[in-house]
């Protein structure tokens, strides 16, 4: 029986993979294994490993790796600790295949460890570009360390093939997160407000802002510009629900600024470390817009028919639909972008705009390949 190991480091990648993990767990053809690392094991980021277990999954190994700092040095050390921990996890679990999503540094460490153990890697969301983050390079590196590739668009599948990956092992399946939304049972807004102990009302935005890691030293300026622009909307009666940034280099300073601003505007702003998958989808569904620089604004928010304001360069180069408005990371540009994204015209456009990341049968197609595709641990560079 095939042992399929899911490696997860953040609330984001776990939330996207949950339906796929359930599909594998319910199969009689495989044994599911779960390794939780990085932000999942940090109280600062909501100790979200508890959410994994609350969903009914056994966490087979916990790999603690996150240092209490966000400098380049601490990030690299966290990568090293992740790789050491993954060595122990893979040595004990001996999976037949490891499933890795995305482009974060702990996933690069996990993929590197899998390579040495000769464990084939199935990579989700390869071939994408995000020019404003070092994640862009990490994603492509994971592609070269991976055996099976599940891409969110046809263009991204072609990019993976351009990198020398055999087309027979590259599958355009769509984004799992976009499909998940269609199947998620959403919560009433009142229930989420009770959890938050905060009244969102019917005029609020969901905001997420991460550091642009290819622009070190810009964290404070860009975050301040974003918050100042949002302040103009607060004065007009809008409210903001902030989900705090990931454990990227520079992320702690961004989080500090957001929390200070939220405290100064406590009647209009709520900042949380983690909402959990269902609550996050629910607040998105009831909101007027998603704003900031998270990939969720491009990949998931369009499926709710709400507009997105994409700020700055972090997601630059990523495919997007007509519901997305782009602006520079300056206060004046963000204010203009907010005016547009919150307009009735943009609301109407977003309500019918197709999501380029949606494709039918995403989870089933991925699961079928994980369960049945022949696993040859040797691969060669593909040249057409």
Image (cartoon, rainbow, N blue to C red):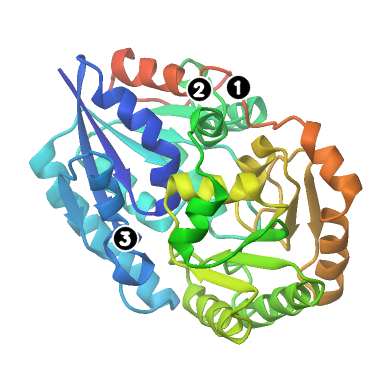
324 sits left or right of 75 in the view: right
What quarter of the picture does the C terminus occupy? top right
Q: Is residue 280 visible to the viewer in this orientation of the structure? A: yes
Which residue is more in the foreground, 153 or 113?
153
**Which label's residue is closer to the chain start, 1 or 3?**
3
The residue wearing badge 1 is 359
Cβ–Cβ under 8 Å for marks 2 and 1: yes
Instruction: Indicate which disc residue 362 carries.
Output: 2
What quarter of the picture does the N terminus occupy? top left
The residue wearing badge 3 is 38
The CA span between labels 2 and 1 is 6 Å
Tag count in the figure? 3
Task: Give residue 359's position: percent from left, percent from top.
Answer: 60, 22
Say which element carries label 3.
helix
Q: Residues within 10 Å of mark 2 (few under 14, many from 20)?
A: many
Which residue is more in the foreground, 372 or 263?
263
Task: Give residue 374's position: percent from left, percent from top.
Answer: 30, 14
Task: Give residue 312's position: percent from left, percent from top.
Answer: 73, 63
Task: Give residue 100's position: percent from left, percent from top.
Answer: 37, 40
């Amino acid at each position: 029986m095939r042992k399929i190991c899911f490696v997860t480091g953040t609330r984001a990648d776990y939330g996207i993979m949950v339906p796929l993990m359930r599909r594998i767990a319910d199969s009689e053809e495989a044994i599911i294994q779960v390794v939780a690392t990085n932000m999942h094991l940090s109280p600062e980021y909501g100790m979200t490993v508890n959410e994994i277990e609350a969903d009914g999954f056994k966490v087979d190994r916990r790999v603690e790796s996150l240092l209490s700092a966000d400098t380049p040095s601490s990030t690299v050390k966290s990568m090293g600790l992740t790789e050491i921990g993954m060595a122990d996890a893979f040595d004990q679990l001996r999976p037949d295949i490891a499933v890795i999503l995305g482009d974060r540094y702990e996933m690069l460490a996990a993929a590197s460890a899998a390579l040495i153990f000769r464990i084939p890697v199935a990579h989700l969301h390869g071939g994408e570009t995000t020019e404003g983050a070092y994640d862009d390079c990490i994603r492509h590196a994971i592609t070269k360390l991976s055996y099976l590739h599940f891409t969110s668009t046809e263009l991204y599948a072609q990019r993976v093939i351009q990198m020398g990956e055999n087309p027979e092992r590259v599958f355009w399946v769509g984004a799992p997160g976009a499909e998940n939304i269609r199947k998620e049972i959403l919560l009433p807004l009142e229930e989420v407000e009770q959890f938050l102990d905060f009244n969102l009302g019917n005029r609020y935005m969901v905001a997420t802002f991460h550091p642009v890691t290819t622009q070190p030293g810009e964290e404070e300026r860009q975050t301040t510009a974003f918050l100042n622009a949002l302040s103009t909307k607060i004065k007009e009666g809008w409210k903001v629900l902030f989900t705090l940034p990931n454990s990227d280099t520079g992320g702690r300073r961004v989080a500090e600024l957001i929390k200070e601003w939220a405290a100064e505007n406590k009647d209009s702003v709520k900042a949380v470390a983690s909402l959990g998958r269902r609550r996050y989808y629910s607040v998105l569904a009831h909101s007027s817009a998603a704003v900031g620089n998270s990939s969720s604004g491009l990949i998931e928010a369009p499926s709710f028919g709400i507009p997105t304001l994409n700020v700055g360069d972090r997601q630059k180069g990523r495919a997007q639909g007509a519901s997305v408005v782009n602006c520079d990371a300056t206060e004046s540009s963000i204010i203009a972008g907010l005016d547009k994204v919150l307009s009735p015209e943009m609301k109407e456009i977003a309500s019918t705009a197709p999501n380029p990341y949606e494709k039918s049968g995403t989870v089933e197609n991925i699961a079928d390949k994980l369960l049945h595709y022949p696993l040859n641990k040797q691969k060669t560079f593909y040249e057409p």
